[in-house]
Image (spheres, rainbow, N blue to C red):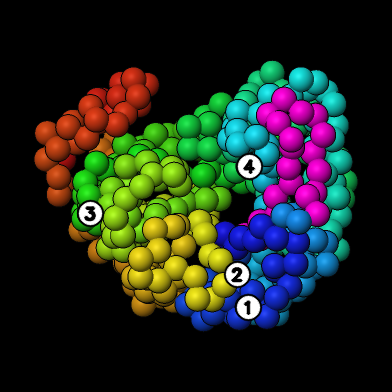
């Protein structure tokens, strides 16, 4: 789970301790602790810890130690947000060299803290889509080299769902991170079966690409609001809608079933778990699963109550038709859905590149 706070001392409160402890009781074994730094505008070069909004160093120490005391592994995850409202994927500083120099300084600040606290995984950037391509590789090489001199644990970067194929430095990291807000359905309350079908082409795309990159994949974020049409634009936190906890729960269920046994898939962090143990609940339209039906889906899968066997996966998980020979042996052909259903989905959601690849898939 992504564990989130946007106040200096929020992670160090008794409420936060209680919320983190409860997260452990539903079977979670990892937590991504979020720390957000800020820029004044998308073109600024200065990156800074806001005295009010950024978790203080003492609160980060507290929450990491608290997580470890609960038996939770920790990923420390860095975000940078412009205060002018620009999405971080559209940051484009006026002085690229100065921005990366400042960014490296902020990363190294948290890397030293992570190493001293025994943090198990560090995410050194999130959704910096405008700054992660080939033109910027040299800056990332410099940053990652400096990080490796300090941090002995593995590294990941969290690419946006439409960015992961163009990140230029995966070879320098230990994991591929994807913020997996893939569009899946236009249905108000999509069934688990519909969502599993909707995952088919995305799984094919990710698996084919992963075979070329050769790094295990983590969903550094995946999340759904408890509203109607939750799977239509999962990334969009501004959409208005009616409370629909079942849509959220079905989306959670489908993610687990679609990726549970993928040999290249290393794990996921849902967005998000809040520091208030009473967060969420009936009427809440946000992403948290707390006190909603999705929380019980987490309990079932994290706690092992719902652990689909390979045989069950053949029955309920639609897998891509273009499977490798090894994939076929793992049961990665699924005869449940007719080709016309897949084509209808494909025409609705896929880009041209993915369509071309998926049209070559074979029916079983």
Q: Main secondary structure of the magenta part?
A: loop
Residue 36 lies in the magenta stretch = yes
Query: Closer to the camera: disc 4 or disc 3?
Result: 3
How far is the residue under mark 2 from the one under mark 1? Answer: 6 Å
Question: Quadrant of residue 339 in the image?
Answer: top left
The foreground one among 118 and 275 is: 275
Discs 2, 1 touching: Cβ within 8 Å: yes
- What percent of the width, then of the height, locates residue 125? 68, 42
Can you say which quadrant of the picture contains the C terminus? top left
What secondary structure is marked by label 2? loop
Residue at 39%, 58% in the rendered image: 285
Which mark is on residue 15? Answer: 1
From the image, tell me which residue sits under label 2: 275
* Location of residue 33 in the rendering, given as x and y in whole percent from the top left corner: 66, 60
Sequence-wise, the earlier of marks 4 and 3 is: 4
Q: Residue at x 32, y 55 (%)?
A: 227
Q: Secondary structure at mark 3?
A: loop
Residue 126: image tag = 4
Task: Give 142 or 364, whichever is nearer the viewer.
Answer: 142
Mark 4 and mark 3: span between their CA atoms?
30 Å
Question: Disc 4 vs disc 3: Cβ atoms closer than 8 Å?
Answer: no
Range shown magenta: 32-51
Quadrant of the image for the N terminus?
bottom right
């Amino acid at each position: 789970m992504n564990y989130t706070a946007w106040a200096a001392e929020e992670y160090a409160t008794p409420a936060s301790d209680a919320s983190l402890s409860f997260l452990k009781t539903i079977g979670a074994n990892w937590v991504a602790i979020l720390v957000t730094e800020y820029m004044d505008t998308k073109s600024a070069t200065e990156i800074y810890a806001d005295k009010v909004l950024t978790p203080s160093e003492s609160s980060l120490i507290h929450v990491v130690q608290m997580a470890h005391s609960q038996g939770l592994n920790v990923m420390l995850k860095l975000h940078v947000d412009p205060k002018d409202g620009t999405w971080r994927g559209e940051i484009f500083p006026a002085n690229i060299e100065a921005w990366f120099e400042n960014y490296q300084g902020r990363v190294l600040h948290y890397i030293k803290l992570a190493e001293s606290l025994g943090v198990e995984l560090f995410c050194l950037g999130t959704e910096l889509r405008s700054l992660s391509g080939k033109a910027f590789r040299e800056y990332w090489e410099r940053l990652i080299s400096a990080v490796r001199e300090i941090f002995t644990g593995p590294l990941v970067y969290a690419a946006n769902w439409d960015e992961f194929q163009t990140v230029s430095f995966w070879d320098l990291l230990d994991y591929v991170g994807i913020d997996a807000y893939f569009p899946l359905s236009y249905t108000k309350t999509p069934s688990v079966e519909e969502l599993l079908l909707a995952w088919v082409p995305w799984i094919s795309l990710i698996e084919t690409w992963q075979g070329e990159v050769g790094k295990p994949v983590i969903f550094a974020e995946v999340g759904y609001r408890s509203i109607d049409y939750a799977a239509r634009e999962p990334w969009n936190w501004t959409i208005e809608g009616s409370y629909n906890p079942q849509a959220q729960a079905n989306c959670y269920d489908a993610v687990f079933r679609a990726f549970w046994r993928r040999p290249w898939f290393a794990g996921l962090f849902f967005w998000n778990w809040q520091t208030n143990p009473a967060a969420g609940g009936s009427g809440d339209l946000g992403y948290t699963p707390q006190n909603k039906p999705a929380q019980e889906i987490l309990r079932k899968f994290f706690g092992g109550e719902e652990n689909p066997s390979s045989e069950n996966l053949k029955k309920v998980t639609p897998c891509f038709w273009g499977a490798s020979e090894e994939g076929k042996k793992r049961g990665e052909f699924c005869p449940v859905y007719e080709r016309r259903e897949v084509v209808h989905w494909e025409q609705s959601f896929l880009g041209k590149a993915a369509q071309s690849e998926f049209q070559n898939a074979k029916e079983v």
